[in-house]
């Protein structure tokens, strides 16, 4: 029988790849702590994460795994920057649901593409559907030709 330590495992210069339903979340960070008992991995020190064409940057990213070790969600804290093609988004906090293909931005979220910008209390970007839902929203549309 193999017993795994219940204490967190600390890693430096970390690259991780998490899969769910043929989706891949790749994470790079200077440091990470994997709490095997709790099923959480916390990446810190300037995080870069990719899901397909989505690029996320934040100070800290926490990944929650389910009982079988499968991916549940990733939470970004610190200033969050996201980009995908010509689209960009910022916020103080973000949650990524890889299985549903959703990025939810909070704490002063903004989303734009160079010509237009959306600001609200909460912005949900349905990545696989190319759809945005916004709460308490304000949209600035550039009308110039």
Image (tube, rainbow, N blue to C red):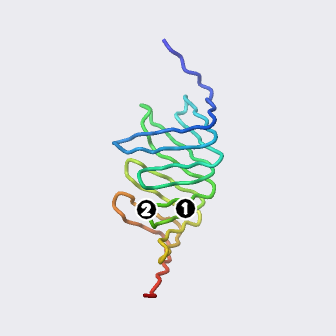
Looking at the image, is mark 2 or mark 1 earlier in the sequence?
1
Q: Residue at x 49, y 55 (%)?
A: 55
Image side of residue 103 versus residue 61, left or right: left
Q: Nearer the viewer, residue 15 or 75?
A: 15
Image side of residue 12 versus residue 103, left or right: right
Where's residue 50, x and y in %? 48, 50
In the rendered structure, find residue 125 and report the number of the disc placed on it.
Answer: 2
Label 2 crowd (10 A; few <14 / some 14-19 / many >=20): many
Q: Are marks 2 and 1 in contact (CB under 8 Å)?
A: no
Residue, far top: 1
In the rendered structure, find residue 41 and report the number of the disc placed on it.
Answer: none
**Quadrant housing residue 78:** bottom right
* Secondary element at tag 1: strand
Image side of residue 15 versus residue 128, left or right: right
Q: In this view, does 76 lie above or below 41?
A: below
Q: Is residue 105 above or below residue 73?
A: below
Where's residue 142, x and y in %? 47, 83
Q: Which residue is drawn at 62% across and 33% down?
A: 11
Q: Is residue 145 above or below residue 28?
A: below
Q: Mark 1 points at which residue?
A: 106
Where's residue 48, x and y in %? 55, 49
Image side of residue 22 versus residue 40, left or right: left
């Amino acid at each position: 029988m193999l017993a795994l330590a219940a204490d967190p495992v600390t890693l430096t210069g970390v690259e991780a790849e998490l899969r769910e339903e043929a989706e891949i979340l790749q994470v790079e960070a200077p440091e990470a702590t994997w709490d095997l008992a709790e099923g959480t991995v916390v990446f810190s020190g300037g995080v870069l994460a990719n899901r397909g064409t989505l690029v996320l940057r934040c100070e800290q990213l926490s990944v929650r795994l389910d009982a079988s070790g499968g991916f549940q969600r990733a939470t970004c804290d610190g200033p969050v920057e996201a980009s995908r093609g010509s689209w960009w988004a910022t916020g103080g906090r973000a949650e990524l649901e890889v299985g549903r293909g959703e990025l939810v931005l909070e704490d002063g979220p903004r989303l734009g593409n160079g010509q237009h910008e959306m600001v609200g209390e909460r912005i949900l970007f349905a990545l696989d559907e190319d759809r945005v839902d916004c709460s308490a929203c304000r949209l600035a549309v550039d009308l110039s030709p």
